[in-house]
Amino acid sequence: MRAVLVVNPQATATSPGGRDVLAHALASQVKLDVVETEHRGHAMTVARSAARGELGDVGLVVAHGGDGTVNEVVNGLMDGAGRAARHASAGVHDAGDVTRAAAQAGAAAPIPPASIPPAPILGVVPGGSANVFARALGLPHDPVEATHRLLHAVDTSSTRCVGLGVADSGSTSAHAGGPADDVASGRRWFTFNAGLGWDADVVAGVDARRGKRTSPALYARTAVSAYLRPPHGRPAISVEVPGEDPADVRTVFVSNTDPWSYLGPRPVHLNTTSSFDTGLGLFGLRGMGMATVLRHLRQALKQGKHRGGRLIRHDDVSSVCVKAEKPVNFQVDGDLVGTRTRVEFRSVPRALTVAV
């Protein structure tokens, strides 16, 4: 098997020594190319090229970095070789429906399915601070242990098909420096969460401090600052799920699995029944009063059994439409996308194969 190892040297827990150990171990079992990312979007470009067959017959792409690196690799894999068009409309999960999906989305007909090579398998060796996707898959948090787990998965062909979320938001107000293809399409895949409002304000605040090592303390300080001084105010946000009337909220969290994230070693639970085998979870707050926020923060850090009159929550939904009266920050997998006034989220079952 031919493989590509994508390393983010700026990630919290990556190091030249760790990279070399991982590369040496993988090279003992596969024909390996190693790429160190040099800028935002680089990992996405490499993964896209691998999925399109431009790097040879690549069967495995390994992401060694934080959740942002994993998200870029996933978006590259899904975008490569026409795979984004394959899932362009809700309910289209069969490769034989590629052309029809593209037509429904108003896109040009993609490469015929018969000529599309299978997408490479994703491998993950955590190298960030939270590593939510890897932990949700049950992978070891320690990079060395995760490397051994990956080698065993490669040796035994142990894989898992996971569902993903996809967010379509148009091409306006993209985050500066974002990948050009993503900006053009307005489509971002996500592995564990997305959000508009307060949580995206926190991501924006941490992103503005890029260069500092991220930590639970940094996120906590930024969360308090964003709560007290929201950069875009608290504009009304409307959320709608199939079969329900629209509801007005002030912040929106969309989950593809549980936990929603981690605060250090502690899981943060919003939609506890969400998993890679279900639809999306929606969690919204109608108000951002101190009592409401503290109540749900306490519940999120316990067992996630949320109760409250200001809560809007839905589990296992196929789609969510979010509209804001003014532009608000929007994030996926802890990566700032930009500001948006409308985002449509969809669940795509069994979208990606992961080595476990």
Image (tube, helix red, strand yellow):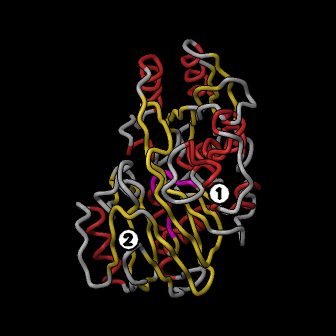
Indicate the position of residue 103 as horizontal and vertical percent values: 67, 58
Callout 1: SS: loop
Which label number is shown at residue 82? none
Residue 274, quarter of the rendered image:
bottom left
Indicate the position of residue 269 as horizontal and vertical percent values: 32, 60
The kind of residue on which mark 2 rests is: Phe
First to last magenta residue range: 189-195
From the image, tell me which residue sits under label 1: 210
Q: Quadrant of the N terminus?
A: top right
Relative to 131, residue 227 above or below:
below
Is 143 within the magenta?
no
**Residue located farthest toward the top when viewing the structure as drawn:** 28
Residue 204, quarter of the rendered image:
bottom right
Residue 189 appears in view: yes
Comparing labels 2 and 1, the label whose residue is closer to the camera: 2
From the image, tell me which residue sits under label 2: 283
Residue 258 appears in view: no
Mark 2 closeness class: few <14, some 14–19, many ≥20 residues within 10 Å? many
Residue at image position (53%, 35%) is: 122
Relative to 148, residue 294 above or below:
below
Q: Quadrant of the C terminus?
A: top left
Q: CA distance from mark 2 to mark 1?
A: 28 Å
Residue at image position (50%, 73%) is: 321
Is 194 within the magenta?
yes
